[in-house]
Image (cartoon, rainbow, N blue to C red):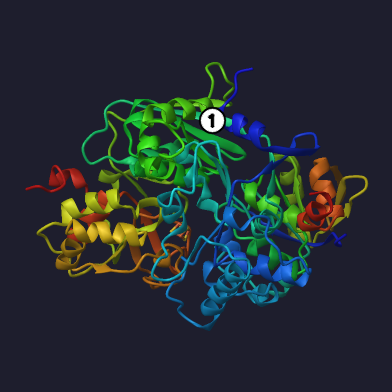
Amino acid sequence: MKKFGGKVLFLDRSDINTDEIIPAKYLTEISKEALKPHMLEDLKLEGFYPNSPEVKDSSVIVSRGNFGCGSSREHAPWVFEVNDINVVVAPSYARIFRQNMFNCGMLAIELSEADITSLFEHKVAGAVIDIDFAKKQLTISSGKGSRTFDYQISEFDRALVEAEGWVGFADAKY
Amino acid sequence: MAMTLAEKVFKAHLRDEPFPGTKVLDIDVVMCHEITTPVAINDLVERGMDRVFDPRKIKVVIDHVTPAKDTKTALQGKIVRDWARRHSIPDFFDIGRNGVCHAIFPEKGFIRPGYTVIMGDSHTCTHGAFGAFAAGVGTTDLEVGMLKGVCAFREPKTIRVNINGTVPEGVYAKDIILRIIKELTVKGATDCVVEFQGNVVKKMSMESRMTLCNMVIEAGGTSGVCMPDKVTVNYLWPFISSEYADKKAAVADFKKWWSDKGCAYVKVLEIDVTNMEPQVTFGYKPDEVQNVTELAGTRVDQVYIGSCTNGRLEDLKVAAAYIKGRTISPMVRGIVSPATPKIFREADKLGLIKIFMDAGFCVTNPTCGACLGMSNGVIAPGEVCASTTNRNFNGRMGKGGMVHLMSPAVAAVTALEGVITDPRKYGKGGAA
Ligand code: SF4
């Protein structure tokens, strides 16, 4: 299983699309590693600078609704993966993006809007998120204190994470 | 129990339900293009599983960047080409015979009512126009599809959209779907199939139905769907004539896929098109849609007519009717990209290619090209493109550029004037 948790990158906008996560011009790459420097390159967001040390150190993304909409490109989860970001936390996802994350053995955690708003309260203070996969719990800690949230994950998604992706799962079963 | 079309297709294709709510379906058509497939191929090779489940059910095209523009895109083409040859995949479309995936595959008769279709491309929802369940997937789902012929989905809910009224002059399927996306919002159809019904859809050509279904993903939808009927049978007849005694029999057979009376919809949307204006997007999201009159006068640098949304013969005919005998603004670069070689040939036969060229348009080979800002018409920072494509995301057609989505009619008159223009000003296709 992949390692989950670490420093948080807050992206305070809804509808962040996969073109913003990895622009189409890099889709000519055939290795995941080559995508690495271009993560979130076209994201327009106040106070956000792609390739800043803060972005590079992050391991968890916390964002708003409909995360990962648009193109089906799995290059979006891949660019996160090669930058050691294996978890996204948001109130909702585009279907294909969410499936792609689990298909790669990564986590796309859904929390309520209210819980996401609570997470964003930690934005100012260098936050870290820990994931307890067995207990289905997520804990955020920062200068503002710490708080634990329960999250739901379907049995299928859980199995995909444990199998480190859909190829392994499907090959064993079909 | 009364079922929706999508539920019927799911039932007919259910291979396994490994966990409650997770349906693993047998897939009838796995479609591949050169952008999302190479990584899947390489991964299978690396895992020592370089196999395909059924070469006849896999359809392959090189369409996004063709001819190759550099070494990297040439290599993507090569990986896909070598793989298709290695596995004797009969339906592989390389340069000279290639076209935009969601235009060329239906044209070849690969999609049938009741089919399950996947592709590593979000606009796969287009093929639901034939009464199929057609979903865009990522590379891993595609990889498993290529290898095993299965794909996992949650049971879909269905949103029904009834499109009724009289379609006014200057209004087309593109305007209608833009209006629907505005109402549903960019996430309003997430995890849902969007089913199009109503008297307007009944009268629509397959091309228009594909335009409707194509943009369902822009509302987050999994697949668009239309009920397969006479129009569907007429379109597919060259491919299915040996399977049915006559067209009537085919229509009757296709009816088995129709959503039953009393089936469950999560939402029903009523659209009356009678007083609708042509629609144009204004922001960076496809649900940011306004009436053309509100955006009229907006300066543009490039006009692009093409793509899997509006690069079909019907679209070129509409645009050419406005362009005929006129020339485009000297302030505008006009690009027309017929979506397939067949469309190109037919447009040529009808004299449309000449009309576009006489007007000052550049006519390109069939390719995605400018639609996703990869080749063939990338715009510069600060530039504006009036486009018949489906995405206006920031940077979509070139970093720092702006895209306004619109119908081929609005695009055509916008090219003439250099600013966003209401096609109704030109009367019936500019016959004036
Ligand atoms: S034309 Fe555009 S939207 Fe359609 S498949 Fe090609 S890149 Fe995608």
Q: Residues within 10 Å of mark 1 (few under 14, many from 20)?
A: many
| Residue at x 21% of width, y 37% of height | B169
Q: Is residue B268 left or right of residue B369?
A: right
Question: Who is closer to the viewer here, B112 or A14?
Answer: B112
Q: Position of residue B331 (x, y in %)?
A: 21, 69
Question: Who is closer to the viewer here, B29 or B331?
Answer: B29
| Residue at x 31% of width, y 49% of height | B407
Q: Position of residue B171 (x, y in %)?
A: 27, 40
Q: Position of residue B144 (x, y in %)?
A: 71, 55
Q: Quadrant of residue B156?
A: top right
Q: Position of residue B233 (x, y in %)?
A: 39, 35
Q: Is residue B390 above or below residue A53?
A: above
| Residue at x 36% of width, y 38% of height | B176
Quadrant where the N terminus of chain B sits is: top right
Residue at the far left in the pictured view: B432
Q: Which residue is mark 1?
A: B159
Question: Who is closer to the viewer here, B225 or B28?
Answer: B28
Q: Is residue A71 above or below residue B242?
A: below
Q: Quadrant of residue A29?
A: bottom right
